[in-house]
Image (spheres, helix red, strand yellow):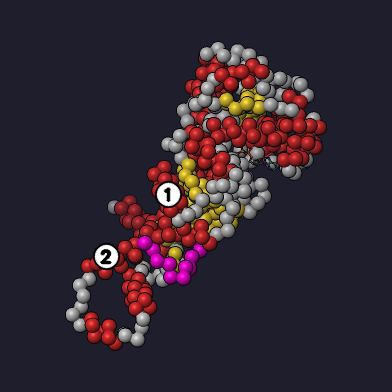
């Protein structure tokens, strides 16, 4: 199936051609005909599967044909409002489509003026939209098509009541479309309330497992090697844009500062940051000024930045679905991506569980530095030097080594100390296959034992 099969208005076809889209994605193939036919619908598909164009293209087409005058897209965050509005602008510019982002934190005046001027597609976040409706400022806004994008995320962010209130203001004779990556019960109920005889389209099946154009590697490391490992990775990998996932906001701050201190073009992104800072950070990453974005899962959700070449899990994610979501940020639109996960020996089992559950094809790697020295070793050596008393006979040793110049001598002595102190891995980061095989063996025999214990107990 080709885009031409949809019989779009020539201006819309041009937008698609210039955007470089070759072929409709699975969700697009399914939902575009339904939307054109005027159905309400629920579309379920994972992030990065082209949902924006799935609803954007038919809406632009209907506007271009003057079948409708106005559409409203409701999205959970300001970042998504910008993304969706950008994408629609690019696809619709030959059809002369005007879009407007409506969100909180800025003045009302300009937004209201532009709505009254007849902007055709309004992309809004729930809070500000509700305020505008409540204030009676936008009675003129009676969209013929309404899209609820990333509905599950709106639920997570506590916008459900706002959404329900907003729909009380919107006239009933509308076409309503709801998109979501997952379908929790409250979203199904919401769909029952606001949609009319909807069609349900789900293309999550094939997407629930990981994509094979993503090359997946992992390193089993000592907990104290994590910082060193990330730096070494960034020094050796050829990345264009790299997304690093942390589990906590604090960790995002710490890791981004660590990388900045090592002169990487890195920035952090998490929910505690001011909205303006978040916007600036995302923009800078998109423009490739920031090369490395360190983020939490929540902050990175729905983030669509093209050309992410590497996703690095600084820590293993909490669950298999997050793993799939995270690494799905790279290798999009047919380009191969790199996904790298750092796990401590404790986290290793968890990774194996994820691997099994999502059927991921991942391989173990090690990094062999030429004698990298981790900071804990340096600390240890320094402290040892401070604390060591000078041996009474040491002048005799020194005399025997008089043929070495002082600098060489000191370097050799320090190297010897470092060699003594280091974990015995000689600067290598990550355990190799033999070690990991042993770990798996131990793990299995442990499991067997605990299984036996259980059996024994039951018999009693
Ligand atoms: P979702 O909303 O499902 O997370 P997006 O709509 O943000 O996904 O699309 C992800 C990326 O894929 C965007 O950069 C978009 O421009 C691109 N894209 C969408 N449809 C196609 C297509 N048919 N062919 C190629 N790229 C596409
Ligand atoms: Mg989307």
Residue found at x 66% / y 47%: 333
The answer to whether mark 2 and mark 1 are in CB contact below 8 A is no
Does 411 sit above or below residue 280? below
Find residue 446 and report its horizontal and vertical position in percent: 37, 60
Occupied quadrant, residue 70: top right
Which stretch did the figure color magenta? 362-375
Q: Nearer the viewer, residue 57 or 179?
A: 57
- Pointer 1: what residue? 257
Find residue 296 and report its horizontal and vertical position in percent: 46, 43
Q: Is residue 447 visible?
A: no
Find residue 111 and report its horizontal and vertical position in percent: 59, 21
Find residue 176 and report its horizontal and vertical position in percent: 64, 23
For label 2, being within 8 Å of ligand 1 is answered: no
Residue found at x 46% / y 58%: 231
Q: Nearer the viewer, residue 287 or 57?
A: 287
Q: Secondary structure at mark 1?
A: helix
Q: Residues within 10 Å of mark 1 (few under 14, many from 20)?
A: some
Upstream in the sequence, badge 2 or badge 1? 1
- Pointer 2: what residue? 383
Residue found at x 73% / y 32%: 93
Q: Is residue 394 visible?
A: yes
């Amino acid at each position: 199936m080709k885009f031409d099969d949809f019989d779009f208005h020539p201006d819309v076809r041009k937008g698609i051609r210039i955007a470089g889209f070759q072929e409709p994605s699975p969700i697009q193939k399914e939902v575009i005909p339904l939307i054109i036919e005027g159905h309400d619908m629920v579309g379920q598909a994972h992030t990065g599967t082209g949902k924006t164009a799935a609803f954007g293209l038919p809406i632009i087409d209907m506007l271009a044909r003057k079948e409708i005058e106005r559409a409203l897209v409701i999205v959970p965050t300001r970042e998504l409002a910008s993304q969706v509005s950008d994408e629609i602008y690019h696809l619709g510019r030959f059809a002369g489509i005007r879009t407007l982002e409506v969100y909180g934190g800025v003045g009302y005046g300009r937004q209201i003026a532009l709505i009254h001027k007849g902007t055709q597609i309004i992309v809004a976040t729930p809070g500000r939209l509700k305020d505008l409706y409540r204030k009676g400022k936008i009675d003129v806004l009676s969209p013929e098509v309404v899209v609820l994008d990333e509905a599950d995320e709106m639920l997570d962010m506590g916008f459900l009541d706002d959404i329900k209130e907003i729909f009380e203001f919107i006239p009933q004779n509308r076409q309503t479309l709801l998109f979501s990556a997952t379908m929790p019960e409250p979203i199904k109920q919401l769909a029952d309330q606001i949609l009319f005889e909807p069609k349900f389209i789900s293309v999550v099946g094939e997407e629930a497992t990981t994509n094979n154009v993503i090359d997946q590697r992992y390193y089993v490391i000592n907990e104290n090697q994590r910082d060193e490992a990330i730096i070494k990775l960034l020094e050796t990998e050829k990345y264009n844009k790299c997304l690093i996932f942390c589990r906590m906001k604090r960790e995002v701050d710490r890791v981004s500062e660590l990388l900045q201190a090592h002169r990487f073009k890195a920035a952090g992104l998490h929910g505690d940051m001011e909205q303006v800072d978040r916007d600036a950070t995302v923009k800078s990453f998109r423009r490739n000024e920031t090369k490395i974005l360190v983020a939490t899962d929540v902050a990175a959700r729905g983030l669509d930045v093209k050309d992410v070449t590497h996703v690095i899990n600084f820590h293993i994610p909490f669950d298999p679905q997050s793993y799939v979501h995270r690494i799905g940020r790279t290798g999009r639109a047919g380009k191969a991506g790199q996904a790298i996960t750092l796990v401590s020996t404790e986290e290793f089992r968890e990774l194996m569980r994820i691997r099994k559950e999502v059927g991921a094809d991942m391989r173990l790697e090690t990094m062999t530095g030429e004698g990298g020295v981790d900071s804990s070793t340096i600390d240890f050596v320094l402290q040892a030097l401070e604390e060591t008393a000078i041996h009474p006979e040491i002048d005799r040793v020194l005399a025997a080594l008089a043929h070495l110049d002082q600098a060489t001598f000191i370097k050799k002595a320090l190297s010897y100390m470092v060699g003594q102190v280091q974990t015995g891995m000689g600067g290598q980061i990550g355990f190799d296959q033999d070690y990991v095989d042993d770990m798996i063996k131990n793990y299995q025999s442990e499991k067997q034992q605990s299984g036996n214990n259980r059996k024994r107990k039951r018999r009693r």
